[in-house]
Amino acid sequence: MRKPVVLITGAGGEIGHGLIDQLALQQQRAIVTLDVSPLDAAIGRKVDREITGSILDRAVLDRILAEYQVELVIHLAALLSTRSEFTPMMAHQVNVEGTLNLLEFAQHEAESHGRPVVFIYPSSIAAYGIPDLATKARAGRVTEDEWMHPRTMYGCNKLYCEQLGMYYARFYKQLAAEPAAGKVDFRCVRFPGLISGLTVPSGGTSDYAPEMIHAAAKGEPYACFVRPDTRIPFMAMPDGVDALLKLAAASKANLSRTAYNVSAFNPSAEEVRDVVLNAFPDAQLTWKTDEKRQGIVDSWPADVDDSAARIDWGFAPRYDFQRAFSEYLIPTIRQRYQRG
Ligand code: AKB
């Protein structure tokens, strides 16, 4: 008898750390993880099975299909926006072909055990593309169906995979003799910049905010690569993890869409620097704009309308800007570096 599980891909990444902690506390399903790198021991010991392998390796997915009854897929494996700009073909392979492999996997799992598989997919504000700063200012709080003209490979990947997920959920093999759609219950959040106290940021263009905090806590100088007036939406990682779990547990009847905006606060880069300096007065935080990365962040919205998530499945972030820093980020990151 195959044991029901939740499969987490990219489990060793920034979201995975907090997610595994929460899933282990919930104890609703056994936890199986798939990542190209071994997990940190702190989270590895909380999972039931840790598989080191690639989402591009279909033989690995076939083995998981044979061994487990996967009821929930949380697909975190991805190359983020900055890294994807340096390796666009690899980004397409991992972000798109890897996601397609997982959607096929979920389809076969659902066909095998006869119940839909909930597929949770973290998209991003990178799916948006606003042409210039004047338009960004006029656009204000962007809804899910506006400005979907991404300017990065990562944003293109995320937007296309949102559409792929909807295809599997609603139209998969629509010309077949037997209906095959509806077995993958695809659900997606468009994350803002996520800031974690537990992990060091890697490869994102929104990473200037967490990089600032980590550098200040380590006593290292940091030159912020965006202008002081740069403004995009952010969220503390615990709220990001809670959003994924809340969407996964939501009744499908309440979901009016497959992709939802979520956000919590949208400070300027200067406001982030001010709150970090307040916590670390000796921090050496300067400005050195990288015009190319600035262009990416300027194409992302200053804020998003997340009312659909709040209405449909009760999204409600715990941390506003001040609390995110005073109660979570500063104490967690300070402790991280005091431990050494
Ligand atoms: C990135 O910067 O690439 C990510 C994102 C905004 O999705 N953090």
Image (spheres, grey):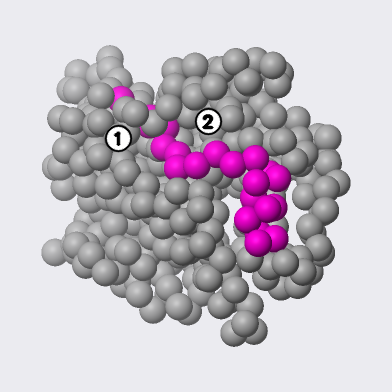
For residue 177, side relative to residue 227 (left or right): left
Task: Give the camera-side residue of 86 and 237.
Answer: 237
Q: Is residue 204 left or right of residue 120?
A: right
Q: Where is residue 297 in the image (x, y as percent from the top left)?
A: 68, 34
The reply to whether residue 290 is visible in this rendering is yes
Residue type at mark 1 is Arg
Mark 2: give few (<14), some (14-19) or many (20+) Cα within 10 Å: many
Does the beta carbon of the residue at mark 1 sit less than 8 Å from ligand 1? no
- Inspect the magenta stretch and tell me whether residue 329 lies in it: no
Type of amino acid at the residue the image marks with label 2: Asp
Residue of label 1? 310
Q: Camera-side residue: 219 or 157? A: 219
The residue most toward the right is 288
Relative to 173, say whether 99 is above or below. Answer: below
- Marking on residue 51: none
Could you say whether the residue bearing mark 2 is in a helix, strand or loop? strand
Q: Position of residue 278 (x, y in %)?
A: 65, 62
Q: What element carries label 1?
A: helix
| Residue that carries the numbered disc 2 in the rendered image | 303
